[in-house]
Image (cartoon, grey):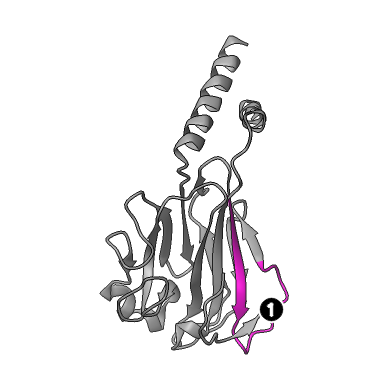
C-alpha cells in the first residue's frame, strides 16, 4: 500500500510539474510495407518549417521510388514556413505543445511506384506513440485516389498498429492516399482531475491548395 501511495504521489507531481511548465511532447513513427519510415516528434528548439530537425528523403529513397511502396510528408514552398523546394520528408520535428493546442501534420502520402506488383498498401505503427499525459493523437484519411473505391475506416488512433488500404500505384505521389495527423492537448485539468489521472495510472486544419484525389 505504501508503495502504491508513493507511485501515486510521484505521478501526480510529474503531471503537475508538466502542467506548470506547459510543455507537452509526442513522438511516433509509421512505416510502409515498402520499408519507408516517417517520424513525427517534438523538440523545444524546433520551429514550423524547414529547420535542423526536418529530414528530407535521401538519394536512396528517391532512386527506388518507382519500385517501392512509398510514404512521405509533402511540403511545398510557402507552406507553414517551408522556404525550400517542394519535397517529401522522412521526419518532421515540431515545437512542444501548450495546453489546449493542436498540432496538425498535413499532407502525409502513401502510394506504390509504377513498377510494384499489386498488393495491399500498409501503414504500420512502429511502436506505441510516446505521448505526454493529456495528449491525444488521431490519424485521419483526408482523400483517396480517384480510381480507388474505398469504404473502410478513415480515422485511427494510437491503438491501431496497422492500417491496410487497397493497392494504388502512380508516378506522382501527391495523387496517393492523403492523411493528416492531429495531436491535441486537452485544456489543463484541475488538481482533482490530475489526481484522478494519477489514480488511473496506478491501476494499470486546412491548406489553400488544389488537392488531388477524392475527399473522404
Q: Is residue 24 visible?
A: yes
Please determine whether, in this image, residue 18 is positioned above or below residue 164.
above
x and y, in percent, of residue 165 in the image: 61, 73
The one of 145 and 190 positioned closer to us in this rendering: 190
Which residue lies at the image location 36% right of the left edge and 49% below the top edge?
44
Residue tagged by mark 1? 150
142 horizontally vs 25: left or right: right
Crowding near pointer 1: few (<14 within 10 Å), some, many (20+)? few
Vertical order, 48 against 3 (above or below)? below
Residue at the right extreme, as displayed: 151
Depth check, front residue: 170 or 26: 26
Secondary structure type for disc 1: loop
Instruction: State the image coordinates of residue 34 (x, y, percent, origin top left).
Output: 44, 70
Residue 29 location (% of width, % of height): 46, 57
**Residue 165 seen in the figure:** no
Name the residue at 31% across, 75% down.
83
Q: Is residue 68 left or right of residue 133?
A: left
Instruction: Point out the stretch of residues depicted in magenta.
Output: 136-154
Where in the figure is residue 120, as x and y percent of width and height?
Answer: 58, 74
Amino acid at each position: 500500500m505504501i508503495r502504491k501511495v508513493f507511485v501515486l504521489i510521484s505521478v501526480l507531481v510529474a503531471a503537475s510539474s508538466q502542467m506548470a511548465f506547459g510543455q507537452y511532447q509526442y513522438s511516433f513513427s509509421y512505416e510502409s510495407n515498402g520499408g519507408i519510415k516517417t517520424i513525427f516528434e517534438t523538440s523545444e528548439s524546433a520551429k514550423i518549417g524547414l529547420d535542423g530537425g526536418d529530414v528530407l528523403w535521401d538519394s536512396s529513397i528517391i532512386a527506388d521510388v518507382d519500385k517501392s511502396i512509398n510514404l512521405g510528408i509533402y511540403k511545398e514552398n510557402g507552406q507553414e514556413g517551408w522556404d525550400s523546394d517542394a519535397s517529401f520528408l522522412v521526419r518532421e520535428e515540431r515545437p512542444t505543445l501548450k495546453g489546449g493546442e493542436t498540432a496538425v501534420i498535413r499532407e502525409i502520402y502513401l502510394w506504390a511506384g509504377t513498377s510494384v506488383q499489386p498488393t495491399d498498401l500498409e501503414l504500420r505503427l512502429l511502436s506505441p506513440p510516446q505521448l505526454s499525459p493529456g495528449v491525444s493523437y488521431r490519424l485521419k484519411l483526408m482523400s483517396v485516389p480517384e480510381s480507388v473505391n474505398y469504404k473502410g475506416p478513415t480515422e485511427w488512433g494510437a491503438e491501431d498498429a496497422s492500417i491496410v488500404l487497397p493497392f494504388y500505384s502512380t508516378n506522382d505521389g501527391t495523387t496517393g492516399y492523403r492523411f493528416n495527423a492531429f495531436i491535441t492537448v486537452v485544456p489543463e485539468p484541475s488538481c482533482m482531475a490530475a489526481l484522478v489521472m494519477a489514480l488511473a495510472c496506478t491501476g494499470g486544419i486546412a491548406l489553400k491548395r488544389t488537392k488531388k484525389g477524392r475527399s473522404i
